[in-house]
Amino acid sequence: MAEPELPNSDEIRELKEKPFTKKVALVTALFAVCLAIVSLGGNNAMKEMLLTQQQSSNQWAFYQAKVLREHLYRAQKMRLEIDLAVAGSSLSPASRQQMNETLKQFAGEEERYRTEKKEIEQEAKTLEHERDINRAKDPYFDYAEVLLQIAIVMASISILASSTTIFCFALVSAVLGVLMGINGFFLLVHIPFL
């Protein structure tokens, strides 16, 4: 197995003293700062997406419970209406009044659940919308991170190779990464394939 070749300390000192190396190192540090910001944005978008998905699912489960209760009261109300129709005049006035009051109570409960479920449905749809926004942001952050990581690597290679061409490639990659990151935060432009 071949031994790895360690860089000569004189060569490293010489690289440090070159103005190109210092400038590229400083710019690479800026790339790293941008990468940290974009990574934070991506992590937050993912967390928000998962949180709002969970909250939305909870709201839809709550909605379903309200629907079941609404149907239960509707069924009880319908059964009571049938009983009133069948029993008709054979009921005493007190029994008829009690059944009518119970019928009104069932109708009121049915209406209450119908109203409550509409509010819950609206809240669930709002949460789904927030989830969708964060889902749309996430790919921009992912691509921004990749482009900024490429920029950092290429900038490091440009130092070792003393190549302005490679450094220009790193700059282009970083600019694209920053633009993708900005778009991840603000969704200014929709890119079709993302």
Image (spheres, helix red, strand yellow):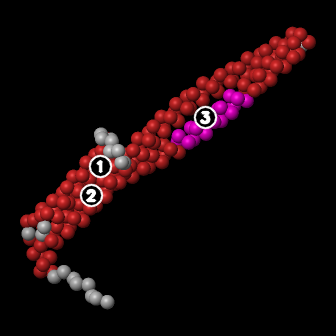
Name the residue: 30% across, 44% down: 183
Q: Which label belongs to residue 75?
A: none
Q: Secondary structure at mark 2?
A: helix
Q: Residue at x 36, y 48 (%)?
A: 193
Q: Which residues are magenta?
A: 55-72
The furthest residue to the bottom: 1
Name the N-terminal-most of marks 1 and 3.
3
Question: Disc 1 residue type?
Answer: Gly
Q: Is residue 149 magenta?
A: no
Question: Where is the N terminus found, in terms of image quarters?
Answer: bottom left
Q: Quadrant of residue 70?
A: top right
x, y percent for residue 118: 57, 28
Q: N-terminal of the two: label 3 or label 2?
A: 3
Q: Is residue 172 above or below residue 69?
A: below
For numbered disc 1, what is the local secondary structure?
A: helix
In this orientation, which residue lies closer to the viewer: 172 or 53?
172
Q: Residue at x 52, y 42 (%)?
A: 55
Majority secondary structure of magenta residues: helix
Kindly indicate whether the residue at mark 2 contacts the one at mark 3 (C-beta within 8 angstroms). Answer: no
The residue wearing badge 3 is 63
| Residue 59 image point, x, y percent | 56, 38
Q: Which residue is mark 2?
A: 148
Give the residue pinned by disc 1: 181
- Left or right? Give the position of 24 relative to 52: left
The answer to the question of whether label 1 and label 2 lie on touching residues, with beta carbons closer than 8 A, is yes
Instruction: Name the residue: 8% across, 65% down.
Output: 19
